[in-house]
Structures are given as C-alpha cells and as structure tokens.
Image (cartoon, rainbow, N blue to C red):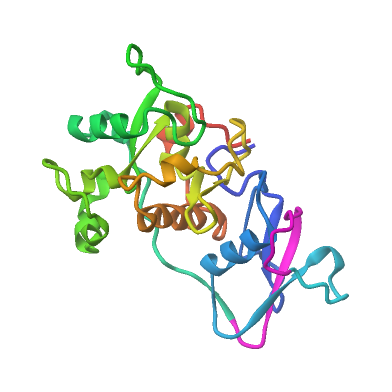
Amino acid sequence: MDVTNRSSGRNVFIYDADNPAEPLGGFVLTAGMTNADLHLIMGMVCVLYSNYYIMDGLVYGTNKRIPSDGEELQPGKYYVLTNGYITVNEEPCLPQPVAADSETCPAPFRDAIRERDRRCAITGEGVTSSDRSGFEAAHIFPLSHEDHWNKNNFNRWITIPPAHGGPINSVQNGILLRSDIHELFRNYDMSINPRDNYKVICFRPDEKGIAGKHLDKQFVGDPRRPVDDLLWWHFRQAVLVNVRGDGEPISKSHTESGVSSS
C-alpha cells in the first residue's frame, strides 16, 4: 500500500450525486464514527449552496437518507443530493511541521504542560516524577507556523499568556501526549472534536486503540486546558488534510517515523 498517499485504505467515499464519476473525498472508517460525523466531515470538505441530504450508495435509488444522528457509520459510498450545486472547499492547509515541536518548544511551555496534565490526555497513562521519557508537550497549533498564527490573530483565543515566548506558547495551546500519539497528532492522523464531547477521531487505521475515546472530564474541567477554538482548528485541518480529494501528501519525515498508513 502506498504510504505516501492518504487515500490508501479508504472505505468511506463521498460523491456528488450529480457527478458520481469521481469522489469528492473519503476516509478510513474507525471506531466511534457516526452518521453525524459523516455530515460534519462532508460539510467541511464541500461547499453547499442549498439544502442537501446524504443517501446511502448501497441502496441508491431507494431514497434511503442518512440522518445526522449517533448511529454507527457503515463503510460504503455516500451520495450528496442538493437542489443547488456542490464545490470542493479550497481552503488551504498548513504544511506538516518538518520537525516535532518537542524538539524546539520552549522549556517553560513544556514544564507548564507537564505540570498541568501529568498524563497523556488521550490514553490516560500517567507520568512519574522520576521518569518523564516517552511523553511530549505538544503544540496544538504548530509552533513552526507562528507567522500564520500572528497574521490571523489567533492571540485572541488566549486568556492565559505565558511569561515568555508569546501567546502561541500558552498552556492553552498545549497538550501532553505519549510520544507515539504526539506523532499521530502532529501529522493529523488523529484529532479531537471539541464539539462532540471531545471525541478522538482517527483518520488512519487505529493501531493504538484510541479512536472513539473522549478526553477525561477532569482534564476538560481544568480552566487552563486547551481552548476549544484551537482544538477545532486542528480538527478542521485534520479533516481537510485526510478527507478532501485524495488527501494532502504525506511528508517524507512522516513515512520515516514509522507511522502506519496501511
């Protein structure tokens, strides 16, 4: 399987019913994905100019509509029907950072994230005071794209500025992750939907057993936790990177890291 192609392994495909020759996009179905997720993802990938509904391709012609509900999503082909027309969202994606933020992140940021979280926010594994290896303080919005942060005034989302390093290094733009989970997060192979009870969505085959999990309530209840706007930004990026068209190219550093695309 081509590890440089994000379309490899897809088993959910989204089509324009009026132009079914080529899919608008698709993704790998993982645990916890629902019909509502299909509607949400489709709405990010596509621009719709009228009301729509989604029809199950397995029963195409029988008018079986897929509601936006909590039922488990099934693999297959899905067709978007509308009285208007559909275009693909051309919103640009930021390139993947070449190096992990943990290699360059300021020590005060790292220490603040470690002190707040004390465990991997996704897996729940705790960090001992004597051994912090295997855990990394991850920037939600990549530190390497600080110019984009400043240009779009993402500072407005930060209410707890750090003493040093600028708002992008606020504790509100960070999360403690196990090193292998950080790699998935950094490369948009998984993300967190803050508008669905902080559900973890995986866009590649889930070899870590994290798909469909929700962030711990204690973590979510911490006033210093990551702000929803930044989590939503990351989730939207992950959808566009993985689902739109054939997906964005996978960087060489990604494939060399050992992240599976099979």
The quadrant the N terminus occupies is top right
The residue drawn where x is 22% and y is 63% is: 153
Q: Position of residue 184 (x, y in %)?
A: 48, 37
Q: Is residue 127 above or below residue 183?
A: above
* Along the viewing direction, whichever of 183 and 4 lies nearer the viewer: 183
- Residue at the outermost bottom position: 83
* Range drawn in magenta: 67-85
The quadrant the C terminus occupies is top right
43 in magenta: no
Q: Position of residue 6 (x, y in %)?
A: 56, 46
Q: Is residue 103 above or below residue 214?
A: above
- Residue at the outermost left position: 164
- Residue at the outermost top position: 130
75 in magenta: yes
Task: Give the quarter of the image for residue 116.
Answer: top left
* Along the viewing direction, whichever of 50 and 107 lies nearer the viewer: 107
The residue drawn where x is 42% and y is 57% is: 232
Specify the principal SS of the magenta part: loop
Q: Is residue 66 left or right of residue 134?
A: right
Q: Is residue 205 left or right of residue 65?
A: left
The residue drawn where x is 26% and y is 49% is: 145
Q: Position of residue 240 (x, y in %)?
A: 49, 58
Q: Position of residue 88 (x, y in %)?
A: 53, 70
Q: Is residue 188 left or right of residue 5?
A: left
Q: Is residue 178 above or below residue 4?
A: above
